[in-house]
Image: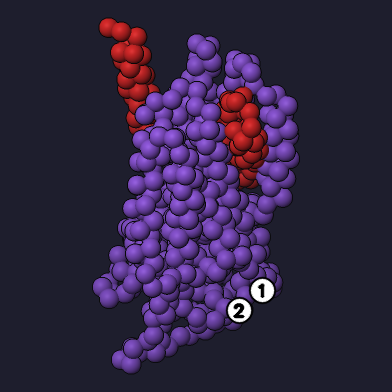
Chain colours: A purple, B red
């Protein structure tokens, strides 16, 4: 047993060193390998040092798991990464809950502390499992991406929460009967669903981050059940990671976590009031855009999720490459909530071979707009709406935005004049220095590439 | 001190010991994860997903516990956690491979 614990500590050190190497894209890939070595050590140490293991069951489980995991990892499109992470969070939570449930059925060292940690582990793990599947369904389109709300929803959630506290307490101190425990499982599953369905599609990055954190907490709780260092340390790392990402996402939208979870934003259609003036926009053709770009020196591209939906990343990179060949400086501005999960847009652009040095964060890029000749906004809307800076009545007021309006010329590509997720008009489109380029992002970029070549 | 008291005291010491480990791990996690740049947040998530597959260790141990329903739980837990570990590390590697310099 001593050696096993030493192996777990060694595995934990490798996890920490692996994550440390994620601090730069240069070392990140080796960091992932280091962390996977840690996992291998933990698994081997467990296999060799526990008696009475059922190796046949373990082998069957690992073979099935490996086939499924490898299949997903190889097949998944980068646009579908949020779904994959969501469903994997669910598997992680589910695994932890099942381990705790197995321990409940056949307790190795029963005590009040042990029962209490089992209850916590089962609760968090099951909630993560069902919540993640709803999140997956929303991202994949199986479940409506719009918030699902009904009257008495909050009351229902409150009732479930209170019942959970009772069932949790009784499953610890209740004695002989198992029904409290099964009630706890059922209600944990239910609250995972009822807490996730009212959250809108645009808020999914927060939810996935939060569920990521829960899957870590569930693993750590299972670590307490089994008194196992490896699970506790790894679980704590993941829990902290998910929580940090959740905070970053909330900050990126200027919303509190409570507002995201209970706010059901995206439900109300904001109807323009009578005194709101209609925005007058100027539109431009791709030939005109090509001429504007010819005389520009510094160009900042602002990609939004609409770009990924149009599958236009590769077309964009080709245009950007061509502009660089013309001697222009090209940068990309990435808003924290661009895409469907933290860092999603960066992965989508990396897939299109955009070098990562060109991708700048909000804080890095905002000072650059003042000295930039052209800002090109592609499939982004709310994150470039200047109303966030000054209009206290706007639902997005206070949200950090990319200051594209400070560029000499702003080119905005959109399919139509439809408002963004927040359901509000964007005054940027009517600014004197803004030109609209209507059309599908991919088609527009292909035309623009042609027009640039013909200059 | 009779036997029960000794056991109770050992248990209390164990509890404090693992709580210490847990809290310190949270601090370490906070420290190193705050240093991960925005650009790598998706691989961080899928990678930490793989790490939360550490539940596989618990799942392996669960297969021995008494047989019956517990073993079935263990089997499903092994499958779930292995999906996490294998899929998580593989997809993270696939993503990080794409991050290139000029």
User: Do the residues at discs 2 and 1 belong to one chain?
Assistant: yes
Q: Residues within 10 Å of mark 1 (few under 14, many from 20)?
A: few
Q: Which residue is mark 2?
A: A439
Badge 2 marks a residue whose secondary structure is: loop
Taking the spot 48% from the left edge, 56% from the top edge, the residue there is A190
Q: Is residue B87 above or below residue A338?
A: above
The chain carrying label 1 is: A
Q: Residue furthest front?
A: A176
How busy is the neighbourhood of tag 2: few (under 14 within 10 Å), some, or many (20 plus)?
Answer: few
A142 or A224, which is in the foreground? Answer: A224
Which of A186/A250 is in front?
A186
Position of residue A54 relative to residue A411, above or below, is above
Total marks in image: 2
User: Toward the viewer: A226 or A42?
Assistant: A226
Can you give x and y, in whole percent of width and height, for residue B30 in the image? 37, 36
**Residue B62 location (% of width, % of height):** 58, 28
Image quarter (top left, top right, bottom left or bottom right) of the C terminus of chain A: bottom right
Residue A377 image offset from top left, x and y in percent: 50, 69
Q: Residue at x 53, y 23 (%)?
A: A11
Asked whether the residues under the numbered discs 2 and 1 touch, taking CB atoms below 8 Å apart as contact, a structural biologist would say yes
In this rendering, position of residue A351 left or right of residue A391 = right
- Is residue B91 visible from the viewing direction of this image? yes
For label 1, the residue is: A443
Determine which of the numbered discs, if any, sits on residue A309 in the image. Answer: none
Separation (CA) of disc 2 from disc 1: 7 Å
Q: The residue marked by circle 2 belongs to what chain? A: A
Q: Residue furthest top?
A: B1
Q: Nearer the viewer, residue A302 or A418?
A: A418
Residue at x 44%, y 55% (from the top left corner) = A191
In the image, A411: left or right of B22?
Answer: right
Q: Position of residue A420 (x, y in %)?
A: 46, 74
């Amino acid at each position: 047993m001593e050696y096993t614990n030493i192996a777990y500590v060694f595995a934990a050190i490798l996890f920490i060193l692996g994550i440390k190497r994620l601090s730069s894209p240069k070392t990140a890939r080796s960091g992932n390998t280091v962390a996977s070595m840690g996992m291998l050590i933990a698994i081997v140490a467990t296999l060799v040092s526990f008696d009475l293991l059922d190796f046949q069951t373990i082998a069957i489980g690992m073979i099935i798991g490996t086939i499924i995991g490898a299949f997903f990892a190889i097949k998944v499109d980068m646009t579908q990464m949020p779904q994959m992470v969501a469903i994997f969070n669910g598997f992680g939570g589910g695994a932890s809950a099942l381990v705790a449930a197995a321990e409940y059925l056949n307790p190795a060292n029963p005590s009040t502390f042990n029962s209490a940690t089992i209850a916590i582990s089962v609760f968090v793990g099951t909630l993560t499992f069902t919540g993640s599947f709803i999140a997956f369904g929303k991202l994949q389109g199986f479940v409506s991406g719009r918030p699902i709300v009904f009257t008495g929803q909050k009351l229902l959630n409150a009732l479930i929460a209170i019942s959970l506290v009772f069932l949790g307490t009784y499953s610890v101190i209740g004695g002989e009967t198992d029904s409290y425990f099964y009630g706890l499982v059922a209600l944990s599953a239910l609250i995972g669903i009822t807490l996730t369905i009212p959250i809108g599609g645009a808020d999914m990055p927060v939810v996935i981050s939060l569920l990521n954190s829960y899957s870590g907490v569930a693993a750590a709780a299972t670590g307490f059940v089994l008194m196992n260092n490896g699970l506790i340390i790894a679980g704590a790392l993941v829990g902290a990671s998910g929580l940090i990402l959740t905070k970053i996402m909330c900050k990126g939208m200027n919303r509190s976590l409570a507002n995201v979870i209970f706010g059901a934003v995206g439900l109300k259609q904001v109807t323009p009031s009578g005194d709101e003036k209609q925005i007058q926009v100027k539109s431009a053709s791709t030939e005109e855009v090509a001429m504007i770009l010819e005389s520009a020196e510094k160009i900042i591209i602002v990609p939004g999720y609409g770009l990924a939906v149009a599958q236009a990343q590769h077309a964009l990179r080709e245009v950007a490459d061509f502009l660089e060949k013309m001697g222009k400086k090209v940068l990309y501005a990435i808003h924290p909530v661009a895409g469907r999960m933290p860092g999603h847009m960066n992965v989508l652009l990396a897939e299109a071979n955009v070098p990562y040095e060109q991708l700048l964060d909000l804080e890095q890029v905002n000072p650059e707009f003042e000295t930039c000749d052209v800002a090109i906004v592609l499939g982004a809307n709310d994150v470039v709406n200047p109303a966030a800076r000054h209009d206290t009545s706007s639902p997005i007021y206070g949200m950090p935005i990319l200051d594209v309006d400070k560029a000499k010329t702003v080119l905005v590509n959109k399919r139509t004049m439809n408002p963004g997720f927040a359901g509000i008009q964007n005054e940027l489109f009517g600014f004197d220095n803004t030109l609209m380029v209507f059309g599908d992002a991919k088609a527009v970029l292909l035309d623009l590439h042609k027009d640039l070549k013909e200059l | 001190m009779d036997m029960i008291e000794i056991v109770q005291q050992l248990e209390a010491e164990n509890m404090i010991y693992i709580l210490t480990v847990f809290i310190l791990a949270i601090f370490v996690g906070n420290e190193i994860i705050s240093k991960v740049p925005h650009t790598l947040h998706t691989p961080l998530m899928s990678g930490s997903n793989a790490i939360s597959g550490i539940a596989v260790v618990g799942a392996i141990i669960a297969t021995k516990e008494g047989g019956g329903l517990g073993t079935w739980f263990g089997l499903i837990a092994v499958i779930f956690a292995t999906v996490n570990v294998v899929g998580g590390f593989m997809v993270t590697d696939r993503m990080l491979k794409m991050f290139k310099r000029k």
